[in-house]
Image: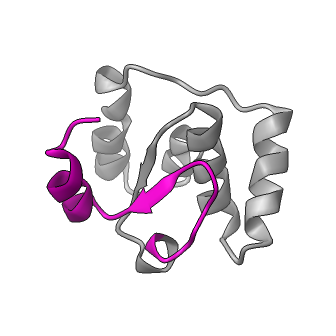
């Protein structure tokens, strides 16, 4: 999902900076039919398509938290994952999980 969204970024400099996530990532989630189906279910909770697919990837990867600055998402209750903003995540976990 990050690659997909980043490729649509019209600003080359920002694209290059965002692409650096791959250098520090320890896990990669290949898109598959299960993720797509989970994303469609999440959209029924009034979650936008790309956000739903991001969360579906996190669920598929068995992440405990989905960290976002999107206030609308932090108010969503999603089975299997805690949606949380970065500051609350750091307060709660000390920044590690």
Q: Position of residue 9 (x, y in %)?
A: 47, 55
Q: Position of residue 90 (x, y in %)?
A: 18, 53
Whether residue 94 is visible: yes
* Coloring scheme used: one colour
Which residue shows up at 15% across the image and 57% down it?
Answer: 91
Q: Is residue 60 left or right of residue 7?
A: right
Which residue shows up at 19% across the image and 63% down it?
Answer: 87
- Count of number-bearing discs: 0
Q: Position of residue 93 (x, y in %)?
A: 21, 46
Which residue shows up at 44% across the image and 71% down it?
Answer: 74
Whether residue 10 is visible: no
Front-most of 42 and 5? Answer: 42
Magenta residues, start to end: 74-97
Q: Is residue 86 left or right of residue 1?
A: left
Front-most of 47 and 82? Answer: 82
Asked if residue 10 is positioned above or below residue 56 in the image, the reply reads below
Asked if residue 21 is positioned above or below residue 12 in the image, the reply reads above
Asked if residue 45 is positioned above or below residue 36 in the image, the reply reads below
Image quarter hosting the C terminus: top left
- Name the image quarter holding residue 4: top right
Q: Is residue 47 left or right of residue 67?
A: right
Q: Position of residue 71 (x, y in %)?
A: 41, 78
């Amino acid at each position: 999902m990050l690659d997909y969204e980043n490729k649509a970024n019209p600003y080359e400099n920002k694209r290059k900076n965002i692409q650096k996530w791959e250098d520090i990532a320890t896990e990669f989630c290949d898109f598959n039919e299960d993720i797509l189906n989970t994303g469609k279910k999440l959209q029924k909770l009034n979650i936008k398509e790309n956000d739903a697919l991001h969360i579906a990837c996190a669920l598929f990867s068995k992440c405990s938290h989905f960290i976002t600055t999107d206030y609308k998402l932090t108010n969503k209750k999603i089975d299997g994952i805690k949606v949380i903003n970065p500051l609350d995540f750091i307060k709660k976990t000390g920044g590690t999980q």
